[in-house]
Amino acid sequence: MGYHYLTASISGLVFGLGLTVSQMVNPAKVLAFLDVTGAWDPSLALVMAGALGTLSLVRAVFRRTAPAALAQTLPKQTGIDGRLILGAGLFGIGWGLSGFCPGPALASISYGKGEATIFLAALFVGFIVFDRVFPSRGGDV
Amino acid sequence: MENFTPYSALIGGVLIGLAGGILLLFNRRNAGISGIASGVLLFKGGDVGWRLCFLAGLIAAPLLYRWLGGNSAIAVESAPIKMALAGVLVGFGTRLGGGCTSGHGVCGLARGSLRSLVATLTFMVVAALTVYWVRHG
């Protein structure tokens, strides 16, 4: 099972390089993407397009070669409910206020910005508060 | 559109997609960062190690990029108190909604999940409205 640690590390590293190269790690760049009526910078739409296209391709190959294994990766929750909308809405407010979503917030630690560290600490406070309010709902997407 | 950087954005996106593919193929996991990071706090036996490895790679990446000679800088525009509020909202909201930009916006959409499409449209529109309210409201 040891290789799982190696592949998880490589995946995290490649993910972080993607955030760095695309500048998604930079909150100012993200806010410029979200500011559609201002000096709009559509770059991050291409980040999503590149990521979606690539992952869809990998999934298509995976589906042909090992459909049973791919089925193991399906999430438990599939419904659309108030929690999904409210959660996504609260996340959207926080994303718009800061320019940070969880990945870039973590990847930004090494830049040594105090505000980024504050965001990251608050992010984990938010995780902990959620687990206190809904102790049974932990887990992955 | 003077700051439009299509090539680096596309290359970065492909890397993120590849990273998601690696985790899916070898670890049978979705690369949703809010799920991976918050799972570290749950301390389920045997389930924390791969998460810490992934996060270590994620955090090391910008260091490696700059060490290799790449140029990368970030600018934070919001005041500390706003960043603190935003962090709590993002942490709580992504858990309640079951994912963030990566989990719903990349992994979920690549799977063709309607749930993830609804979540992605919701946080995109709300984030754009929030920026509008802060900058032009």
Image: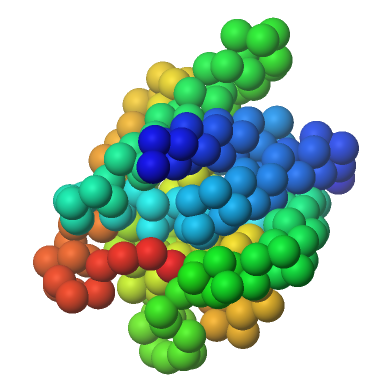
Judged left or right of residue A90, residue B46 is left
Residue B87 position, x and y percent, is: 34, 50
Judged left or right of residue B44, residue A86 is right
Q: Quadrant of residue B54?
A: top left
Front-most of A31 and B97? B97
Task: Please tell me whether residue B5 is drawn above or below residue B27 in the rendered image.
Answer: above
Front-most of A71 and A24? A71
Residue B3 position, x and y percent, is: 81, 37
Q: Is residue A103 visible?
A: yes
* Quadrant showing the N terminus of chain A: top left
Task: Please tell me whether residue B17 is drawn above or below residue A61 in the rendered image.
Answer: above
Front-most of A35 and B26? B26
Residue B135 position, x and y percent, is: 58, 54
Q: In which quarter of the image is residue A68?
A: bottom right
Q: Can residue A108 be seen in this view?
A: no
Name the residue: 63% across, 61% down. Answer: B106
Count numbered badges in the picture.
0
Colouring scheme, one of rainbow, by chain, secondary structure, one colour = rainbow
Task: Please tell me whether residue B17 is drawn above or below residue B129 in the rendered image.
Answer: above
Front-most of B134 and A91? A91
Judged left or right of residue A135, residue A77 is right
Residue A119 position, x and y percent, is: 35, 42
Name the residue: 65% across, 56% down. Answer: A34
Name the residue: 57% across, 55% down. Answer: B24
Name the residue: 81% across, 44% down. Answer: B10
* Quadrant showing the C terminus of chain A: bottom left
